Amino acid sequence: MTTPEAPRILVVGATGEVGRLATRELFDRGARLALTGRDKRRLAEMAARSGGPTRILDAYDLDACAGAGPWALSELGGLDGVLVTVGVAGFGPAAEVPDAAAEHLMTVNALCPMAVLRGAVPAVRDGGFLSAISGAIVIAPLTGTADYAASKAALACWLGVLAREVRRRRIAVVDARLRHLDTGFASRAIVGSPPPLQKGADPGPEVQALVDDLIGHLGDLAPRRTAVTPGQVGTTPARSH
Ligand SMILES: NC(=O)c1ccc[n+]([C@@H]2O[C@H](COP(=O)([O-])OP(=O)(O)OC[C@H]3O[C@@H](n4cnc5c(N)ncnc54)[C@H](OP(=O)(O)O)[C@@H]3O)[C@@H](O)[C@H]2O)c1
């Protein structure tokens, strides 16, 4: 059920595992959602549940990425927050990863979310949030992950600077440094095989905690859910940088 005060939120990459869970979580809390994805059928299925507007978006179309925030603002009549969950894995020794794969990783993991959030800065309201998922890998990158880790580190660095630049507008920039999750993400790598990894964590509680954090930044607009497992998410509010 939505109310006139329901937070209006754009989720970019809504058809991925984390995106799908975050979308469901936000919807359950009464948010009004604008969703983007690149799979028309899965996006339509999600829209049937959320009832909000959708848009096909490929990470390589940076102009379209930059237009997502203004589109959501126009569709929802306001924009309280943006969450970008787009990302792709790629592995291999730094000396062996093909340049085309390195470019792909940098585009999808860094340039796309940067373009979305850059374009969303003028669209999001003062006191709202801008968020993207980097990962715990930016703190402790493993061998065989140089190009993936570099793309996420670039995103994390950019978010840290953005956070300082929008602080005056009380916009929270949330760099979600999620740990390894059991979503099958690494198995969809565009190049190479992942280094030996422990079984990923259950994504449900992690995403719930992330959404709790994001909604919490909106103040009185929506209540925080209390049943969140504390300390399970590596969400870093970059505004403290
Ligand atoms: N799972 C983990 O262990 C983990 C840990 C830390 C951080 N993360 C980050 O969390 C985010 C979500 O990961 P996930 O586990 O939910 O994996 P996922 O299910 O594979 O989701 C990846 C998302 O990125 C989208 N995407 C990939 N390439 C794209 C492109 N060229 N254009 C547009 N969209 C594209 C996918 O779209 P489609 O739905 O069309 O495929 C999907 O929505 C990623 O940024 C990932 O780096 C994941």
Image: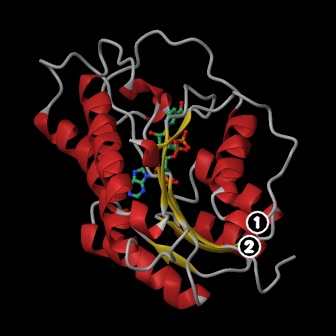
Q: Residue at x 76, y 31 (%)?
A: 230
* Residue type (three-letter) at the residue carrying disc 1: Phe
Q: Which mark is residue 50?
A: 2
**Quick one: quadrant of the N terminus?**
bottom right
Q: Which mark is residue 170?
A: none
Which residue in the protein does label 1 denote?
Answer: 27
**Quick one: quadrant of the C terminus?**
top left
Where is 106 relative to 5, above or below?
A: above
Tell whether 137 sits left or right of 177: left
Tell whether 179 sits left or right of 163: right
| Badge nearest the viewer, 1 or 2 | 1
Q: Residues within 10 Å of mark 1 (few under 14, many from 20)?
A: many
Where is 80 relative to 39, above or below?
A: below
* Residue type (three-letter) at the residue carrying disc 2: Ser
Q: Residues within 10 Å of mark 2 (few under 14, many from 20)?
A: many
Q: Foreground: 197 or 191?
A: 197
Q: Find the distance from the CA under tag 1 to the CA under tag 2.
A: 7 Å
Q: Residue at x 30, y 35 (%)?
A: 153
Q: Is mark 1 within 8 Å of ligand 1?
A: no
Q: Quadrant of residue 76?
A: bottom right
Q: In the rendering, at what x and y percent does residue 3 appear?
A: 82, 82
Q: Residue at x 61, y 46 (%)?
A: 18
